Amino acid sequence: MNKIIECVPNFSEGQDLKKVEKIVDAFRGKEGVKLLDYSSDPDHNRSVVTVVGEPEPLKKAVIEAIGVAIKEIDMTKHHGQHPRMGATDVVPFIPIKNATTEECIELSKEVAKEVWEKYQLPVFLYEKSASAKHRQNLSKIRKGQFEGMAEKVKEEKWHPDFGEEKIHPTAGVVAIGARPPLVAFNVNLNTNDLSIADKIAKKVRYIGGGLRYVKAMGVELKDRNIVQISMNMTDFSKTSLYQSFEMIKFEAKRWGVSIVGTEIIGLVPMMALIDVAEYYLGIENFSTDQILESRIME
């Protein structure tokens, strides 16, 4: 049976859609690879691509896309609301079907090695692929961002796993690794005060004493004149989307603001939404066998 692995590379371009299309083209028309989704955010100045495929063709497509990003994106001129450290900022591999975490770890290391050898782009291994405990958390690796990374990689603690102790001059560095599925879930507030979003994000995220499987930060959406709590739900089966939503709503009351909408970036596992529906509708004794599409797909 075919092994299916998901990859969700994040690229530091969300404004020039011609550049985004050139990067995404690396995933189109490839045997053994299927482009599922991609979205760009001009405020974050970032694009998220979701692809699935068999290990070897997926590996080749990802390496090709990273090469295009190196050519198209100049990080010395990049500005956006989302933290970033490279033209291709992060490349996670996720086991989907007949594949294991260990196989994703091995694939991530193969990609990392080739990316360095082919493009001279330094690589950090993160999450399940991390070479040390302090490198597991992406936010710790990314701290200092592109502007501070040239000095950071000189520190013994932060030498790249693949590459020399210097960054690519225009493409920075990249984090590559294996991880479980996550949900990129954002909540919008009816205020343009970024400090309020920052304060709420600090309360919600785990590192600030909040929910265990939530990473969160405040983001300004200038085109809409509002702010956002941008979250990564790193294990939706243990910290549900409704838990983060309700906690944000609770904290927002302190500042006299309210939620005006939410968004999900990229694809979301069906169970994450079923969990929310069960909670808000108070459905008793619900089973996934009751979902029409699930029965049809059997």
Image: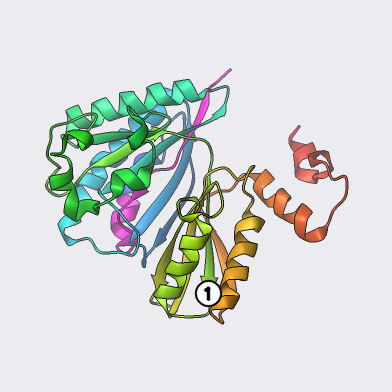
Q: Secondary structure at mark 1?
A: strand
Instruction: Specify the quadrant that holds the C terminus.
Output: top right
Above or below, 77 against 192 in this view is: above
Where residue 279 sits in the image (x, y, percent)?
Answer: 76, 55
Q: Quadrant of residue 2?
A: top right
Residue sitting at x 56%, y 79%: 257
Instruction: Specify the quadrant that holds the N terminus.
Output: top right
Q: Indicate the amino acid at tag 1.
A: Leu
Residue sitting at x 81%, y 59%: 281
Q: In terms of depth relative to the viewer, which is nearer, 136 or 77?
A: 136
The residue positioned farthest toward the right in the image shown: 285
- Compared across the picture, whether 110 is left or right of 273 comes to left
Q: Quadrant of residue 155?
A: top left
Residue sitting at x 40%, y 77%: 223
Which range is magenta? 1-22
Colouring mode (rainbow / by chain / secondary structure / one colour): rainbow
Residue sitting at x 13%, y 32%: 164
